[in-house]
Amino acid sequence: MKLNILTKIKVTGISLAALSILSINAHAQEKIGLQRAVTLALERNLTIKQAQFNEALTNEDLKQSRYNLLPSVSANPQGSLNFGRSVDPSTNQFTNQRVFGLSGSVNAQVVLFQGGQLRNQIIQNKILLEADRTNTAKVKNDLTLNVVTTYLSVLTNQDLVTAAIQQIDIAKLTLDRAQKNFNAGNQTLADLSQAKAQLSTAELNLTNAQNQLELSVLTLKQYMEMAPGTEIEIERPDVSKLAIQTKYNAEEVFKTALNVNPDVRLAEIRRDGFKQAIQIARGAYYPSLVLFGSAGTNYSDARSLLSGYGPTGKDEITGYLNGDLSQPVTMPGIAPITSKYPFSRQISDNFNQSVGLTLQIPIFNRFTTRTAVRKAKITYENAEVTAQLAKNNLSKIIYQAVWDVQAAEKRLQSTSQTYEANKEAYNVILQRYNVGLVNSLDLNTSLTNLNKAQFDMIEAKYQLVFRSKVIDYYLGNPITL
């Protein structure tokens, strides 16, 4: 009697897979498709947030470099209380009394010329900001590719679990038949033991496949910044209906990738930023010209206001007649008449202003500027090499990726043919086994070959999808399933 066990258990295996592929799917709370997984990862991923923070910091540096073109203004108020012999801050004369003084000034200055350093710094900060934006895009692109890779890994492992369940069904049917034949005396204990071993192997394959599936789902959750215990359901697209392109011209792919790939673009922008740093360093060779101005005033409570002179009521000796000390010459004594110097008047009377230019000419600074320029040039040359390395690396990756997708297509064709051949061989051997023409060793060997061929075909199918998506990634195309 012709019996195709693979056909018979197909529906059963798929049904069991729907119930046991993932225990976490039993009470799924959220259905996750590829686009949803990518969106959540881009929204929540902490590495992207760090890149965005660096971008924001560089943007602030750019703003500040522009603000550096504006004048700087500062106010310097000061109050003091002096005791004993001190200098009156208002009259600059020594005094021996307690003096309370106030002073204040407002100073402003603006750089008119500084060797072009301010302007070049603005240009460099613009380049650095563009580099950080490109780095953010690179992080997003890399994360997207990682999510797609992991998502395909989940799909692969789900199919491997389904295949492992089907293997267990086949192994159970084989064991049941071996047990009946053993009980009837038609087979030996060795045949029965081999059937049991085949079932144990199938169960081990299922355990390994389930472990790999759970690990790939956990990795996907981590990319989406989900708690490990979050229950999700993975949408399964029909991979067999995907339009997979496998014919690429590596050189054309490389030329396109050069314009869109963020790795190369990032290296080139950083190189331009280091080139601008040379101009900044050279600016220190030139003089700097600064326009400054200030306004200030002061107050002292020890200062008095002179309002006139008046008699003291006493005569003062101004000399002696013919040098005779007994005949002094006198005149009425006079003394200055003072009053308290009002605060507002002092502030007004002491108001002062100044304006001027400061020219600083570098003559010798122990070769500091020359060293800075040379280091900037070396850094730029190193950045040029880094940019070229990025291009070379991209070229190698592109050619390898094109070869990989072509090899994956051939491998899928080969594994599909091998699977079909092993399936037909197993069906034939099973029929011969049922009528006693082959022993259990031949049957188990055929089943093992069939299982391996099925696993290889599943992996080859998703490997081809992944390789084609890698090409889309480097071409800048949206990655979808």
Image (cartoon, rainbow, N blue to C red):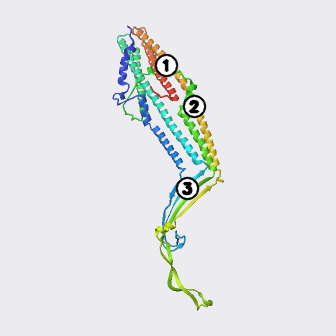
Q: Name the residue beneath numbered marker 1.
A: 412
Sort mark 2 into few (<14), some (14-19) or many (20+) by Cα contacts within 10 Å: few
Sort mark 1 into few (<14), some (14-19) or many (20+) by Cα contacts within 10 Å: many
Identify residue type, mark 3. Answer: Gln
Q: Is residue 202 visible?
A: no
Mark whose residue sits in front, 2 or 3: 3
Image coordinates of residue 87 in percent, x first then y, are 53, 70
Q: Name the residue beneath numbered marker 2.
A: 393
Residue at figure coordinates x 60%, y 51% from the top left = 113
N-terminal label among 1 and 2:
2
Image coordinates of residue 269 in percent, x first then y, are 56, 38
N-terminal label among 2 and 3:
3
Choose between 40 and 435: the one closer to the eye.
40
Of helix, strand and loop, which one carries label 3?
A: strand
* Marks 1 and 3, how far apart at CA: 74 Å
Mark whose residue sits in front, 1 or 2: 2
> Marks 1 and 2: CB-CB under 8 Å?
no
Q: Which residue lies furthest to the left in this view?
A: 27
Identify residue type, mark 2. Answer: Asn
Q: In which quarter of the image is residue 156?
A: top left
Image coordinates of residue 57 in percent, x first then y, are 49, 44
Q: Residue furthest right?
A: 363
Mark whose residue sits in front, 1 or 3: 3
N-terminal label among 1 and 3:
3
